[in-house]
Image (spheres, rainbow, N blue to C red):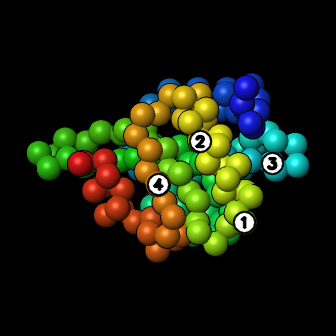
């Protein structure tokens, strides 16, 4: 029994986002929880967005799930576009919303079929290219 429903429209958006071929830039799919209806909703999709621009777009007081297709440059010069899930949960968020967000994280992660989760609690200051590189290259 899931605490928050993931509608078919979100599953379809995730599938489409996942299988879009990318050869440059970052892309992000932002999902939020509608607390009243206990259902996930798509907020926005971004193409060719920098990590700093993405940080500015995310709310400082409300959690989000961000599926990120990230332009990763490896030390040997190769480029890849791994998928990562940013668990955006700023500490200034309402405690009830953070609890609901945390309880639905694993179900969303499995539905999105993303193995790498990057926790972001610091807000926009913590979400940087360097932080994402460090997590994905580790």
Measuring 49% from the left and 44% from the top, which residue is drawn there? Answer: 85
Q: Point out residue 124 in the picture as x, y percentages from the top left corner.
A: 52, 71
Circle 2 crowding by C-alpha within 10 Å: few under 14, some 14–19, many from 20: some
Circle 3 crowding by C-alpha within 10 Å: few under 14, some 14–19, many from 20: few
Q: Is mark 1 on a helix, strand or loop?
A: loop
Measuring 66% from the left and 49% from the top, which residue is drawn there? Answer: 101
Q: Point out residue 4 in the picture as x, y percentages from the top left corner.
A: 75, 37
Of the numbered discs 1 and 3, the one sitting upstream in the chain is 3
Of the numbered discs 2 and 1, the one sitting upstream in the chain is 1
Q: Mark 1 points at which residue?
A: 94
Residue 105, labelled with which disc?
Answer: 2
Of the numbered discs 3 and 2, the one sitting upstream in the chain is 3
Q: Point out residue 14 in the picture as x, y percentages from the top left corner.
A: 60, 32
Distance from disc 3 to disc 2, alpha carbons, whole Å, reads: 14 Å
Mark 1 vs mark 3, foreground winner is: 1
Q: Mark 3 points at which residue?
A: 34
């Amino acid at each position: 029994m899931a605490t928050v429903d993931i509608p078919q429209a979100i599953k379809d958006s995730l599938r489409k986002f996942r299988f879009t071929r990318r050869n440059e830039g970052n892309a992000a799919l932002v999902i939020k929880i509608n607390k009243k209806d206990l259902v996930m909703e798509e907020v926005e999709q971004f193409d060719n967005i920098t990590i700093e621009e993405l940080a500015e777009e995310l709310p400082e007081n409300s959690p989000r799930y961000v599926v990120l297709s990230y332009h990763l440059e490896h030390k040997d010069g190769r480029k890849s576009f791994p998928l990562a899930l940013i668990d955006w949960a700023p500490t200034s968020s309402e405690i009830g919303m953070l609890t609901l967000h945390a309880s639905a994280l694993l179900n969303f992660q499995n539905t999105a079929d993303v193995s790498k989760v990057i926790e972001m609690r610091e807000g926009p200051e913590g979400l940087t290219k360097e932080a994402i590189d460090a997590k994905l290259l580790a």
